[in-house]
Image (cartoon, coloured by chain):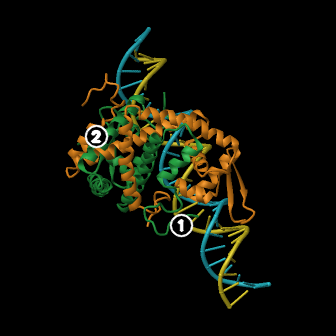
Chain colours: A green, B orange, C cyan, D yellow
Amino acid sequence: MADNSADPTAAALGEPTLEEQIAAYQREFQDLDPQVEKVVSALSRLNRRMNVAYSRQTSELGISNAEWEVLKALVLSGAPYRMGPGELAKRLGLTPAAMTHRIDRMVTESLVTRERDESNRVRVIVELTPLGRERWLEAMRLASVFEEGLLQDLSSDERATLGELLTRLLIRVEHAQPDAGGRLTDLD
Amino acid sequence: MADNSADPTAAALGEPTLEEQIAAYQREFQDLDPQVEKVVSALSRLNRRMNVAYSRQTSELGISNAEWEVLKALVLSGAPYRMGPGELAKRLGLTPAAMTHRIDRMVTESLVTRERDESNRVRVIVELTPLGRERWLEAMRLASVFEEGLLQDLSSDERATLGELLTRLLIRVEHAQPDAGGRLTDLD
DNA sequence: TGTGTAGTCTTTAGCTTCGAACTTTAGGTT
DNA sequence: AACCTAAAGTTCGAAGCTAAAGACTACACA
């Protein structure tokens, strides 16, 4: 249909541009503020592109995006890089069952260790290995290059403005959903 | 660390605040621009909260998020609301196999119809039913209320600024990934 | 006309996740 | 002490996704 052979800013495969998408929303659903829709659509599309980029990076390193998320949670928890499966599951928005299997895989790859907490034998402790920490560092190096590139067209002032506006959105939505640290369908 | 027992803006379940998360990144990975990290972390967290909200809404209507995405693509394609499974799969970032099954389910729920294209019998035409269009409308009504609430703290000027900054990010990343209309792992 | 080739779905097998039942441990109650 | 309840993980079966192979159609070329 559309001939996109020449314009590299047009998305491939007939994907509509942001403007076309907003126009389509106006056409099909009139009582919609175009300003609001522009922000929301841009957020949604941006997030998809970022996920594409992160997936490419992690697969280069021989780990999955799922594993990267676990490594990230453990590192951000600070030394000694330990968390329980349940806490990890909440942080990542997974069921405990999924977390069990994910940890299984990561243990066999030596990214983490799993052992019982001897002071409270119901609990399990998942701990980052040096290899896991190294993989996280490699992933962070790739991610930070990508992120810097993503923002390269914005001045320092613009970056600050964007960060502040996004933070205000986040505060609003986290206030409205104080419980949504859990998985998507876990509500009320 | 932080005592969040009283402050409703603090996320539940010990999830770190945005500031705590950025501080943790600084601690674990020094060569990271805090301004960049703030924007990226806010984007990531915002997206997760938005997905939570959309999932709640669609489940209220008795459809899944997956089905809502198909309805959305069909409606935005414009009347007569028809697309091929392959095109839908590309738009949604799925494999054709997954699209086949997803359409199966939606046909049994009378959200769409599926028939062969008689002018080219290799092709299949997926068409929105009146019921499917009605479900999409109901979902849009809920979504637009949520989206308006999300932006309620921003003035019109701020909304415009945010939309413009996000669009510049999107242009940058779509330029860098002209092929990423496909699924996440489909690269190069 | 016959054959090759490319394009468009569908089918199959394996993996990841979820929901729900189950096991084990800790702590309170009588 | 014996029991009850709650909490933390694991196991089990069903659902959805991917990758790869298969089936069918259209079109080009000899």
**Disc 2 secondary structure class:** helix
Residue at image location 39% in from the left, 56% down from the top: B171
In the depicted structure, whether residue A41 falls above or below residue B11 = below
| Amino acid at dot 2 | Gln
Residue at image location 27% in from the left, 26% down from the top: B3
Q: On residue A168, which mark appears?
A: none
Residue that sits furthest to the front in the current view: B157
Q: Mark 1 falls within which chain?
A: A
Label 2 to label 1, Cα distance in Å? 44 Å
In the depicted structure, whether residue B186 falls above or below residue A174 = below
Point out residue A129 in the picture as x, y percentages from the top left corner. 28, 50
Residue marked by disc 2: B21
Q: Quadrant of residue C29?
A: top left
Query: Which is in the foreground here, disc 2 or disc 1?
Result: 1
| Amino acid at dot 1 | Asp
Point out residue B121 in the picture as x, y percentages from the top left corner. 72, 65
Q: Nearer the viewer, residue B154 or B98?
A: B154
Q: Nearer the viewer, residue B111 or B164?
A: B164
